[in-house]
Image (cartoon, rainbow, N blue to C red):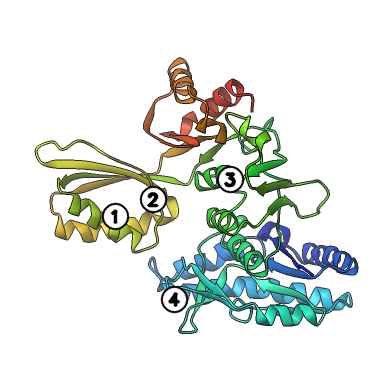
Amino acid sequence: MNPYVLKYGGTSVESIDQIKDVAKRLAERKSLGQDLVVVISAMGQTTDQLLELAASISETPDRREVDLLLATGEQVSVALLSIALKTLGVNSVGLTGRQAGIFTDDVHTKARISRIETDRIRQHLEAGEIVVVAGFQGVNENGDITTLGRGGSDTSAVSLAAALGCTCELFTDVDGIYTVDPKILPEARKLDSISYEEMLEMASRGAKVIETRAVEFAHKYKVPVIVGLSTGDYPGTLIKELDETMEKRVVTGISVDEDCLMVTVNTVPFESKNIAKIFAAISGENIMIDMISQTAPYNSFVNLTFTSKIEDRFNIKAILEKLKAEFPTIDYVIDDSVIKLSVVGIGMVSQSGVASALFNLFAEHDIDFYQVTTSEISISYTLNAYDRDKAVHMIASAFDL
Ligand code: ASP
Ligand code: MG
């Protein structure tokens, strides 16, 4: 029988009462005969608090040790949930990432899962136990503990579902995926379903409900993912392969990335190998970048602009400082007062005029943007953070979101 992989985020296991509630819901599902693998995050703000502890000692704490520290957060919640289950008389076992067979590369604090050995999980399932697994962590081939980057327990869950060949349910504090984050647009609609492609665009461009890498994994291994409220009281949103009803919508949603950093590197000597060097230095640290633009050469120099995440600010600064030794002409600006707003819809593949309609809206409402990039199914802009609500409202009302 196929198991179910369920994941509860930090907001669903913030308190002991919540952990007990989760245990009760798991016990109910178990009594229906379901085999359950449960991935959980650290309680509430634990990961942030652990990071603050490290930061109180050093601005640049050693990343191997940071992983050792952060992984304790999930170990606490796994143990507590398993204790809660056993107290209800339910057989269960709590496992760390290592014990669950989750192996990663060795990029500390941003590791990628390389393989999962599911033997041990399967043995526990066969023994009738609910398997509670620590999200966000794994182990590299040397046996050192690694973590997967913030929000990484979604990836743990989807990868486990892929390895076990089953559906993945992600429980969180919202009841599904909305056309626009309801915190920004309260009247936004909940989607019954969304394609992997659109979800990938929405997540990678700022929608926080699900982690981007988790959607990539789900897409690659065709794992159906349900995002819903941890109480399970309302139907959630199903992320799956494209169907015809989805293709009819021109625009499916808007995502806003407020943790966006716009980095401009000026006066780079004009030669493609220099550009390659800069981006190699950045990607060597597993830093994700986006919206790359380059000016035409002027006096044999070009200016580069790209966007990244606020959390990478110090890493990027350190990398650019190092590059200055090699390229003394360069200077850079790291701007955190911008947001990235993306309009996403698979219908854009077959329908024209979306870009032009958007440019008209920006002009009519007198909103300026710094960069614009397009993919087959999205158009993204960087603009001043203070224009966020105005821009979202004008686009939502024009496209009936
Ligand atoms: N606890 C980790 C974090 O806060 C992982 C997760 O919640 O997904 O980023
Ligand atoms: Mg999360």
Asked if the residue under mark 1 is in contact with the one under mark 2, i.e. CB atoms within 8 Å, the reply is yes
The disc, 2 or 1, on the residue closer to the chain's N-terminal end is 1
Q: Is 311 displayed left or right of 325 in the figure?
A: right
Front label number (4 vs 1): 1
For marks 2 and 1, give the CA distance.
9 Å
Which amino acid lies under the numbered mark 3 shown in the image of this protein? Met
Tell me the quarter of the picture where residue 3 sits: bottom right
- Residue at 55 percent of width and 22 percent of height: 394
Front label number (3 vs 2): 3
Q: Secondary structure at mark 4?
A: helix
Which amino acid lies under the numbered mark 2 shown in the image of this protein? Ile
Q: Which mark is residue 64?
A: 4
Graded by Cα atoms within 10 Å as few (under 14), some (14 to 19) or many (20 or more), the crowding at tag 4 reads: some
Q: Does label 3 point to a residue whose CB lies under 8 Å from ligand 2?
A: no
* Whether residue 43 is situated above or below residue 260 in the rendered picture: below
Asked if the residue under mark 4 is in contact with the one under mark 2, i.e. CB atoms within 8 Å, the reply is no
The disc, 4 or 1, on the residue closer to the chain's N-terminal end is 4
Percent of width and height locating residue 392 = 55, 29
Q: Secondary structure at mark 2?
A: loop
- Residue at 81 percent of width and 53 percent of height: 232
Residue identified by numbered label 1? 279
Graded by Cα atoms within 10 Å as few (under 14), some (14 to 19) or many (20 or more), the crowding at tag 2 reads: some
Residue furthest out toward the top: 364
For marks 4 and 3, give the CA distance.
32 Å
Front label number (1 vs 3): 3
* Whether residue 74 is situated above or below residue 329 in the rendered picture: below
Query: Closer to the camera, 208 or 199?
Result: 199
Residue identified by numbered label 3? 199
- Residue at 48 percent of width and 67 percent of height: 112
Which amino acid lies under the numbered mark 1 shown in the image of this protein? Phe
The disc, 4 or 3, on the residue closer to the chain's N-terminal end is 4
Residue identified by numbered label 2? 289
